[in-house]
Image (cartoon, rainbow, N blue to C red):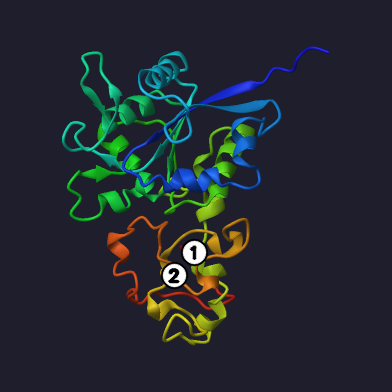
Amino acid sequence: MANRKVEEYPVIWLQAATCTGCSVSVLNTVSPTIKNVLVDEVIPGKHVNLRFQATVMAGAGELVIKELEDTWHKKKGGYVLVVEGAIPTKGNGVYGSIGEHKDGKPVPIDVRVEALGRDALAVIALGTCASFGGIPAAKPNPSQCVSIMQLFKSKRVTTPLINIPGCPPHPDWFVSTVASVLIGGLPKASDLDELHRPKAFYGQLIHENCSRRAYYDEQKFAKKLSDPGCLYELGCKGPVTHADCAVRLWNHGVNWCVACGGICIGCACEGFPDLISPIYQKTPDVKLPNIGQKVVQ
């Protein structure tokens, strides 16, 4: 029997202005495990070939930068670029660089992301910092961090972009996105919302599926975090946050923020953290329907 041909999908994973929490979250994926994702065929006949990822690769220095650049040049238009963290644009590499030019000068992160992004098959912005700027881009933003979306717009990069926000993002959001690309190719415009987020994960407000939703409809609001009742008046950002945490849960379906007594802090929001701060303060009144009424997006 002839050996079955396995199609390789090279992946370059860059880390910019990040705490590495996105990597940690995704590496803790349970089903499939990260071993399944990186070693096995997640989809029969198709294999993810992770060529560069600073946190998990054993090599360092010139050898791994050579691997990155070889993939860039030899697989042009055929690799997937994953970027974690916001992109510092000030200081010509002072706030972050990845490798060096031939003259020994550092390659600024924004230059590297622009170049690799322009030649990629697709780009996945992993986490809120990459998707929207997040904490590194919060005021006063001394490094002038921007999101991938902002960088690409300013540099006229038109490569397909998929945003997977969350601080950190749920591992399912990332792994399922990768699997869907392997199965059906790049997402159609109708699969993504206006912020390039997959509607499968970000199509509804957390408030719509919250386990405390009935309290809201009955106007029963908690006065402190240990109370029963809706947490909206204590600062819960579920009414303005698009994500499926309430139904997907975290830690392999064990729990999520609101169910364990905390509020939703809106970490997947475009305006996190500036526009939704102070975190533990009620947001301006949001007109929301009661159960059974249609939510107008």
Which of the 4 image quarters holds residue 167?
Answer: bottom left
Q: Residue furthest right?
A: 1
Mark 2 belongs to which amino acid?
Pro
Q: Is residue 156 above or below residue 176?
A: above
Q: Is residue 250 above or below residue 155?
A: below
The N terminus, quarter of image: top right
Q: Earlier in the sequence, mark 2 or mark 1?
A: 1
The location of residue 272, given as percent across then percent down, is 34, 58
The location of residue 9, given as percent across then percent down, is 56, 25
Residue at 54% across, 76% down:
213
Residue at 46% across, 72% down:
262
Residue at 31% across, 42% down:
17
Residue at 49% across, 64% down:
205
The location of residue 292, given as percent across then percent down, is 59, 75
- Cβ–Cβ below 8 Å for labels 2 and 1? yes
Left or right relative to 277: residue 179: right
Residue hosting label 1: 205
User: Alpha carbon of mark 2 to alpha carbon of mark 1: how far?
Assistant: 6 Å
Q: In this orientation, which residue lies closer to the viewer: 201 or 67?
A: 67
Left or right relative to 138: residue 41: right
Left or right relative to 181: residue 44: right
Q: Which structural element holds mark 1?
A: loop
Q: Residues within 10 Å of mark 1 (few under 14, many from 20)?
A: many
Q: In this orientation, which residue lies closer to the viewer: 279 or 181?
A: 279
Residue hosting label 2: 239
Q: Residues within 10 Å of mark 2 (few under 14, many from 20)?
A: many
Mark 1 belongs to which amino acid?
Leu
Q: Is residue 240 above or below residue 123?
A: below
Q: Is residue 242 above or below residue 124?
A: below
Q: Which structural element holds mark 2?
A: helix
Mark number, residue 23 = none
Question: In the rendered image, is residue 103 in sight?
Answer: yes
